[in-house]
């Protein structure tokens, strides 16, 4: 069974790529914390938070209750996580084994 979920594993990320992603990830985290505490969560608001941090092409899955997100970081890898009324996670990591920053819907 573990092999069936291997496509979700993340590749290693270099220290340089991780370092380049820290500032935009912090900017996204601050914007999403404001959304979370205000209750103004939406796919569009998450996309705007990434755009304001200078990151284009964010992938999102969700609605006004919770949004999972992933976007290519400035020098490789991904900034990914989830925001809901109860939870905010913003992480930096490599791309997943099947490519991209989020698993494909329906896997």
Image (spheres, rainbow, N blue to C red):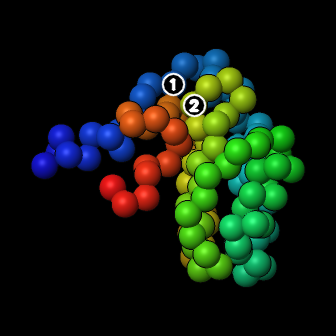
In the image: residue 12, left or right of residue 7: right
> Which of 88 and 76 lies nearest the eye of the viewer?
76
Identify the residue under disc 2.
77
Which residue: 36% across, 44% down?
8
In the image: residue 84, left or right of residue 46: left
Residue 33: name its quadrant. Answer: bottom right
Q: Are marks 1 and 2 in contact (CB under 8 Å)?
A: yes
Q: Is residue 51 visible?
A: yes
Residue 12: name its quadrant. Answer: top left
Q: Is residue 85 above or below residue 67?
A: below
Which residue: 67% across, 49% down?
58
- Number of the label disc, if any, that sits on residue 13: 1
Q: Is residue 80 above or below residue 34?
A: above
Residue at the limit of the structure toward the right, as seen here: 52
In terms of secondary structure, where does tag 2 sit?
loop
Q: Position of residue 94 (x, y in %)?
A: 50, 32
In the image: residue 15, left or right of residue 37: left
Q: Is residue 63 above or below residue 18?
A: below
């Amino acid at each position: 069974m573990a092999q069936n979920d291997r496509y979700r594993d993340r590749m290693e990320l270099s220290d340089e790529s991780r370092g380049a992603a820290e500032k935009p990830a912090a900017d996204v985290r601050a914007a999403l914390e404001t959304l979370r505490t205000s209750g103004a969560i939406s796919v569009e608001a998450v996309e705007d938070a990434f755009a304001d941090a200078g990151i284009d092409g964010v992938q999102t899955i969700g609605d006004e209750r919770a949004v999972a997100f992933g976007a290519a970081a400035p020098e490789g890898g991904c900034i990914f996580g989830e925001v809901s009324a109860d939870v905010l996670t913003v992480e930096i990591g490599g791309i997943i084994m099947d490519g991209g920053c989020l698993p494909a819907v329906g896997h």
